[in-house]
Image: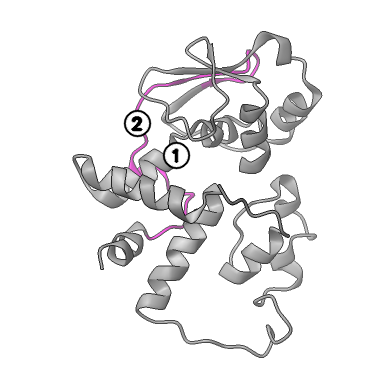
Amino acid sequence: MARYIGPVCRQCRREATKLYLKGERCHTEKCAIEKRNFPPGQHGKDRKPKIMGYGLQLREKQKTRRIYGLGERQFRNLFEKSARMQGITGENLLSLLERRVDNVIYRMGFGTSRSQSRQLVRHGHILVNGRKVNIPSYVVDNNDTVEVCDKSKKNPTILAARDATAHQPTPNWLDVDRDALRARVIALPKRDELVQIQINEQQIVELYSK
C-alpha cells in the first residue's frame, strides 16, 4: 500500500487546520499553522480559493484520511464496511476509525502521534486480549483489553509518550490504567463523545454516495 513519506506539516497547511500529525510539536509555536497558515506551494499566499459543493466534500474526506493516516483505498474500504453496518453510516465510519488499534494506542497516551502509535503496533509492542497484534488496522471491540507487552513496559519511547500526554483527557469509552500501560474498551465510541474531532462525516458520506 502506498504511504505518504513527505513533510506532514504540509498536510496541515493544505487543510488549514491542525491535524496533530507531529505529536507535541503541534502544541508549540513551532507548529506550521502558527507560522505559515496558508496553503503550501509557491503561490500559497496569493491563492484564495472559494470552495463549494464537491470541493468541500473532497477536503473533508482528505482531512479525515490524513488525520488517521490512511490511504485512499483503505479509507474507501472502511467506508464501504461502515455502509453495510446497521446504524448511521457516518457515525459507523468514525467508530471504526477510532477503534483501529493504532488510534487506540494514541488515545491511551502511549504514542504522541498516530504515526508513532502505528510504529509501536508494527514493531510488536502491543497485545490485544493477551495476543500480539502487529496490524495497525486491527479493530478492537467492546470489552477488549489493549496493553503494552511485558518486555516493552520499560521502553523509553513509550514511557516518554505517556509522560508527555499526561495532561490529555482520556476518552469515555476507554478505561486506561496508565501505570500498568493497559486499557479496556468499556463501550463503543459514540459520536457525541468524539467532540475533539472536527470532522463533518456527512460530507464524506455524500461524496462517496455520488
Question: Measured along the vertical axis of the image, is residue 113 above or below residue 180?
Answer: below
Q: Secondary structure at mark 2?
A: loop
For disc 1, the marked residue is 98
Q: Measuring from the top left, give residue 148's x and y in whole percent.
A: 63, 17
Residue at the far front: name it.
1
Query: For the stretch drawn in magenta, what is the main secondary structure?
Result: loop
Q: Measuring from the top left, give residue 123's x and y in whole percent.
A: 68, 26
Tell me the quadrant of the picture where the C terminus can be found. Answer: bottom left
Q: CA distance from mark 2 to mark 1?
A: 9 Å
**On residue 195, which mark appears?**
none
Left or right: where does residue 120 sit relative to residue 129? Answer: right
Q: Measuring from the top left, give residue 135's x and y in whole percent.
A: 54, 29
Q: Earlier in the sequence, mark 2 or mark 1?
A: 1
Q: Residues within 10 Å of mark 2 (few under 14, many from 20)?
A: some
Q: Which residue type does callout 2 highlight?
A: Leu
Q: Is residue 16 at least partly visible in the picture? A: no
Magenta stretch encompasses residue 183: yes
Range of magenta residues: 176-200
Magenta stretch encompasses residue 131: no
Left or right: where does residue 64 sit relative to residue 117? Answer: left
Q: Secondary structure at mark 1?
A: helix
86 or 123, nearer to the observer: 123
Question: Measured along the vertical axis of the image, is residue 44 above or below residue 77?
Answer: below
**On residue 188, which mark appears?**
2
192 or 116, nearer to the observer: 116
Residue at the far left: name it.
86
Figure colour scheme: one colour
Q: Measuring from the top left, give residue 165's x and y in whole percent.
A: 68, 35
Q: Which residue type does callout 1 highlight?
A: Glu
Q: Residues within 10 Å of mark 1 (few under 14, many from 20)?
A: many
**Could you tell me which residue is drawn at 34 percent across and 50 percent down?**
79
